[in-house]
Amino acid sequence: MVRVAAPRIPRLTLPPLQALADHRVARDDVLDGVQIRAGGDVDWRGLRLHGSELVLVGMGSADLRAARLRETRIAGAELGRLRLAGAELRRVELQGGRVGDVDAAEGRWEAVRLDGARIGFLSLRGATVVDLELTGCQVDTLDLTGAQVTRARLHDTRLGEVVATHAQLTDVDLRGARLGRVEGAAGLAGAVVAPAQLLDLAQELAAALGLLVDG
């Protein structure tokens, strides 16, 4: 039996939080122990947030590029686009919600958990990801182009399409996922799949290896 190192993600427990109106939050702010509810487009680039909760509902987009989120929960997000390019997430939970597009390219994720989230397009292009868990999620397209992913596990999660071109995967457990189309299948090297999944991936793997199947 293949041994796969499990993600190391401590359970997030938040202290009592102070409500903070979204109009009082600005770019590059440093905030601790707050709950922020936003219902419109926000530009919070460079925000430093610790021990807090974000509730993002009924929104077009939330711009958190280059933000630093630590020990923070993003709850019930309902928005078109969540911009996290270049952001650092450490011990962060994304609970529930529906997001059309999550752009986390070139970011760093450490001990991140997605639970019950519905995401149209999740980009981790060029990102460094250490300790990631997806449970009960649906992701239409997961883009891992050039990403480095260490210790990740998917459980009861559906991936409509995975782009794995030039990805570097270590201890990535995909056995709990339903996989659709895979692009750049050679980038899945280092991941663990179930026998049935291997059969589903046969065509993509053959193409990646240049194998010709006849008869």
Image (cartoon, grey):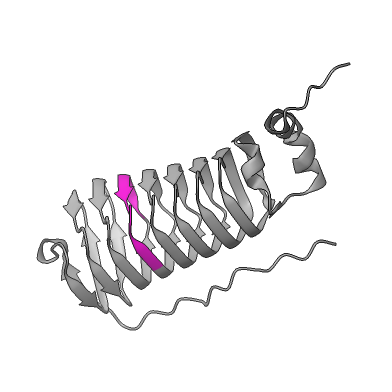
Residue placed farthest to the bottom in the image? 15
Is 92 placed above or below 121 here?
below
Residue 81 is covered by the magenta coloring: yes
> Residue 129, how many percent across, how many down?
50, 61
- In the displayed structure image, the side of residue 1 where residue 208 appears, left or right: left
Left or right of 181: which side holds 194? right
| In front of the other: 133 or 201 | 201
Percent from the top left, x then y, of residue 135? 57, 57
The stretch in magenta equals 77-89
- Give residue 17's position: percent from left, percent from top: 27, 79
Q: Is residue 36 left or right of residue 177?
A: left
- Determine the residue positioned at 79% across, 36% down: 199
- Res. 121 image quadrant: top left
Percent across and percent down for residue 196 are 80, 42
**Vertical comparison of 204 with 30: above or below:** above
Q: Residue 6 appears in which quarter of the rendering? A: bottom right
Taking the spot 75% from the left edge, 30% from the top edge, the residue there is 206
Q: Residue furthest right?
A: 215
Image quadrant holding the C terminus, namely top right
The secondary structure making up most of the magenta span is: strand
